[in-house]
Image (cartoon, grey):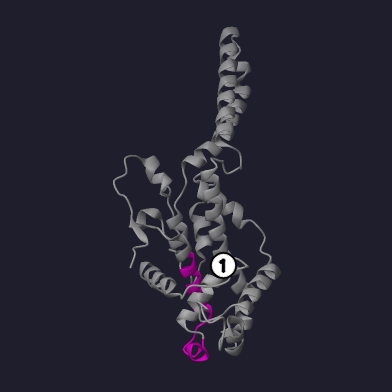
Amino acid sequence: MRNIFKPRKTNSKNSRRNHSRGEHAPGRIRDLRIANPSDQHLLDWFLKWTDDESESRLGFLARQTASEPFNEVVFRNELTTKLTRLRYPQPDLEQGIGKKTFHAILEGAGLLPLILQEDTLHALWKHRLVKDIFQKDSEFREKHLSVEGILLSEHRRMFRRVQRDLGTLERIAREYGLERYLAESYEKMEGEILKVRRPILTSEYPGSKSELLLGRPAKELSSDVRSEDTVIQANIYLTLKQRLQTSETPKRGVSDIFLCQMAELVCARPDVRGLRNGETIRRMANRLTKLR
């Protein structure tokens, strides 16, 4: 099986590299539990762990995306449409001959109200947000944009201009002995420099996707994640398994593989036409369970 984790590099040359991998500056004491699907959503844990917005691009985008309101009606309708349209098991090579839809199987098992209730939908929506965060992160990186959506070259131009203006102000103050009169102006200019420079610094510290996906600090991880989508889907599967599965549900057609395929369905676009068989998601979920 292809290894979807890659070994984490060790013995970094400087703290800046550590920071870019999501590690935190010495002296920052944290008292946070390792994220566990049974008590804390991975996204909630990550937002607490990266509580300084200026720390990384990923942390900033996570806070920005997570602040979007959850539209329960829209999400429920989208999920219901996919559950009603696709049949189990997948892939559906025989075009549904003799097969029931995911919706019909869940309804027959008495689980449809549970999957469509607000708190379950909200938990699944948060997993989907992680995918949205990664897509934004990739877009900003590829287009050389700051977290404010402005070209980094423009931020650097503004930074040089403010630095130049501050230098001019300091020169005038020295020439005319005005230092003590311009102290307040110095403070304002220095604050402006920090404000202009902040998006540049944020872009230089991308953050750790593995922290968000695995719910553990980067320094405690021995490997980085290669297949982000598979891990997101595995996390959705673990949420579904915790909320839906009992000793009786497999007898009603809601097996592990059913939930794995449903996890991909939850994460898929509204116009999804087919799914994989779920084995890759199940193997990944087993690995995540061991890590936690």
Q: Amino acid at mark 1?
A: Ala
The image position of residue 77, as x and y in percent, is 68, 72
Q: Is residue 26 visible?
A: no
- Residue sitting at x 50%, y 63%: 42
Q: Say which quadrant the C terminus sits in.
A: bottom left
Residue 281 percent coordinates (x, y)? 44, 71
The residue sitting at the left extreme is 11
Above or below, 185 against 273 in this view is above
In the picture of the structure, the residue carrying the numbered disc 1 is 268
**Vertical arrangement, residue 285 with respect to residue 155, above or below:** below
Q: Position of residue 41 (x, y in %)?
A: 52, 66
Residue 231 shown in magenta: no
Q: Residue at x 60, y 12 (%)?
A: 172
- Horizontal side of 169 relative to 24 (left or right) equals right
Q: Which residues are magenta?
A: 232-253
Quarter of the rendering containing residue 7: bottom left
Where residue 160 appears, as percent x and y from the top left, is: 55, 25
At x 54%, y 33%, the residue is 197
Dot 1 surroundings within 10 Å: few (below 14), some, or many (20 or more)? some
Spot the residue most to the front. 94
Quarter of the picture containing the N terminus is: bottom left
Return the residue nearer the eye: 209 or 182. Answer: 209
Q: Is residue 249 magenta?
A: yes
Residue 90 visible from this viewpoint: yes
Lateral position of residue 174 relative to residue 213, left or right:
right
